[in-house]
Amino acid sequence: MASLGKPTIVWLRDDLRLADNPALTAGARIGAPLVVVYVLDEMSEGIRRLGGASKWWLHGSLDASGKALAKHGQRLVLRHGPAQDVLLKLAGELGAGHVFWNRRYGGGERAVDAAIKAGLKDRGIAVESFQANLLCEPWTIRTKADQPFRVFTPFWNACRAQMPPREPLPAPDELPSPVDGVASDSLADWKLLPTRPDWAGGLRDSWTPGEDGAQARFQAFRAEKLKDYAAHRDEPAADVSSRLSPHLRFGEISP
């Protein structure tokens, strides 16, 4: 793939996958040198700090994402700190031409993203965000009184009445070359894994964070449990659920 123009930044957040990742697809299409970055932000106002189990999962998911990108000749750059400071500094370091990310929907996250988008545009950098992690975005599903739904069944009926969700995007066949010399934290230095004591043995035995783990879990659900889900989904003891929730939370699989 040809590399032209100013570098492009793709900022990963709750979308740690290659398939059906609109921001990554957009970055690949530009064709300029590409920097894929994840920012560990537990400092910005309104951003909830991760609990211990979430940190354990994030470590595994970032490790898997880094390996997946490496297979495409790319690397995952890790930075930590307030996302606005980190992204604006990185864009300045690179002389970036474009920044892409997939949208988040919490109030604190939206405020952070809006400030970053404004800061990038003030610097003449093109920035675009995408729908990636919800079938329907919150502002598209409203009651007749133009209010958010408060009851699930009417909400779900309204969702089903909408246009069908977009088709999922394939993982890019190729990714542009990385930018040489971009500084990155070490994943190990983030100390996301428990050590004293290491209480994560049960998690390791039961879960495989990352896009491949998510796809394996989905395929197993579809082949073995989906047929019984409707009849037994209200029985707490029945083993019929997909167990996809943590994979969806970290965006290792898209809805």
Image: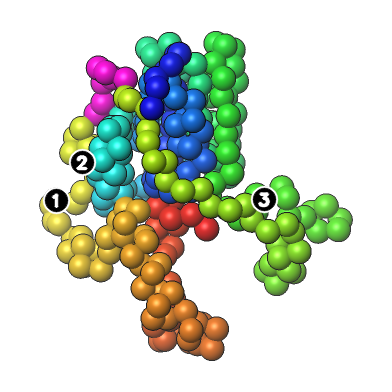
Question: Residue 151: where, in percent of width, then height?
Answer: 71, 68
Residue occupied by mark 2:
191
Q: Are marks 1 and 2 in contact (CB under 8 Å)?
A: yes
The residue closer to the viewer here, 228 or 148, is 228
* Residue 111 visible here: yes
Examine the rendered structure and indicate whether residue 56 appears above or below residue 219.
above
Element under disc 3:
helix
Q: Residue at x 27, y 64 (%)?
A: 207
| Mark 3 or 1: the one toward you | 3
Q: Amino acid at mark 3?
A: Pro
Residue 5 left/right relative to 144: left
Residue 55 left/right relative to 16: left
Examine the rendered structure and indicate whether residue 232 appears above or below residue 192.
below
Q: What secondary structure do most residues of the magenta stretch adopt?
A: loop
Mark drawn on residue 138: 3
Question: Residue 255: where, in percent of width, then height?
Answer: 52, 58
Mark drawn on residue 195: 1
Region of the chain picked out in magenta, as a range: 179-185
Please check the rendered image and state whether residue 55 is part of the magenta-colored stretch, yes or no.
no
Instruction: Tell me the CA gap for discs 1 and 2.
Output: 9 Å
Instruction: Tell me the CA gap for discs 3 and 2.
Output: 35 Å
Residue 203 left/right relative to 232: left
Element under disc 1:
loop
Q: Residue furthest front?
A: 1
Q: Amino acid at mark 1?
A: Thr
Please check the rendered image and state whether residue 184 is part of the magenta-colored stretch, yes or no.
yes
Q: How is the image coloured?
A: rainbow
